[in-house]
Amino acid sequence: MTNAAALPGQPRGGVIAGPATARARCVLAPNPSAMTLDGTNTWIVAEPDSHLAVVIDPGPLDDGHLRAVIDTVEQAGKRVALTLLTHGHHDHAEGAARFAELTRTHVRALDPALRLGDEGLEAGDVITTGGLEMRVVPTPGHTADSLSFHLPADAAVLTGDTILGRGTTVVAHPDGRLGDYLDSLRRLRSLAVDDGVTTVLPGHGPVLDDAQGAVEFYLAHRANRLAQVETAVESGHRTPAEVVATVYADVDRSLWPAAELSVRAQLDYLGEHGLI
């Protein structure tokens, strides 16, 4: 879910076509919109020599898309063995129960309400299906239940909506919290700096081939927006709607409702830190 069009100077990658890395392939869901960019990226992750695959974020409840994902897995000589969710928003998770029915797999997620089966997902978990090593990284902020998945063998991280391939993401107040989001971005920066992650496989938009640059852009963007919100409040704009009209004046008005969620999160953050 995005709250702005692409901004000047933003890091970008190429169009997703075929395998994005040695272990990850994207099937694009047919749900494009201002909020989902080109659509939801459903990720298929598998060891090259394994017959088992993991699917991350089956996407919307669209049988055509869900069957296209299964067909893509089977055409590679594999079968779906497990379904994972980065978070519970409908454009990522609505089709999960139907996908689990079609593939006879369990669904693992941080939120117990989204799980199908006995196992959830927690920080530090390692997915080993079919010989994979995929580490669960907590990245709350966009939502409270947001997770990312670190794929060390490909120097890649699957970020859901925490980092997008284009534009910036919503801090979905009140479930999403800006302080948590900033901590999550710093955690992803550590993966890039300390663990050698170079590639971002996002929940929407193209692959980014400069993970550290993407995180630095997001941190700088958030700091800039936060300063703009603080200035707007000091200028007498008190309500979230008034702040949006001032700070997001250059953004398409169709995105203002999403922007207001982020503004509410920013106002909470500023209040908690005694800045307004």
Image (cartoon, rainbow, N blue to C red):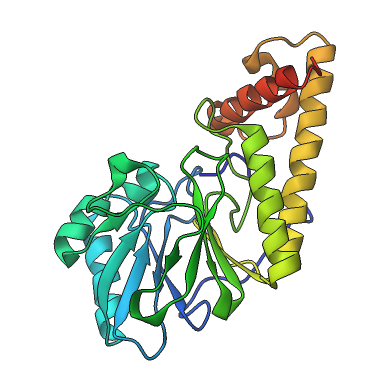
Does residue 121 appear left or right of residue 173 in this picture?
A: left
162 shown above or below 23: above
Q: Which of 56 and 106 is in front in this view?
A: 106
The reply to whether residue 11 is visible in this rendering is no
Quadrant of res 224:
top right
- The quadrant the C terminus occupies is top right
* Circle count: 0
Q: Quadrant of residue 183?
A: top right
Q: Which residue is drawn at 49% across and 30% down?
A: 175
Residue positioned 34% across, 52% down in the render: 120
Seen in the picture, residue 85 relative to 171 is either above or below; the reply is below
- Please state the horizontal and vertical placement of residue 34, each as a whole percent of the image: 51, 43
User: Quick check: 184 left or right of 220?
Assistant: left
Residue 252, quarter of the rendered image: top right
Question: Is 58 displayed left or right of 1 in the figure?
Answer: left
Image position of 105 (left or right of 4): left
x, y percentage for residue 170? 57, 38
Q: Position of residue 10 (x, y in %)?
A: 74, 56
Residue 113 location, x and y as percent? 29, 39
Furthest toward the bottom, the residue is: 49
Q: Is residue 167 visible?
A: yes
Which residue: 61% across, 30% down? 262
Is 33 placed above or below 273 here?
below
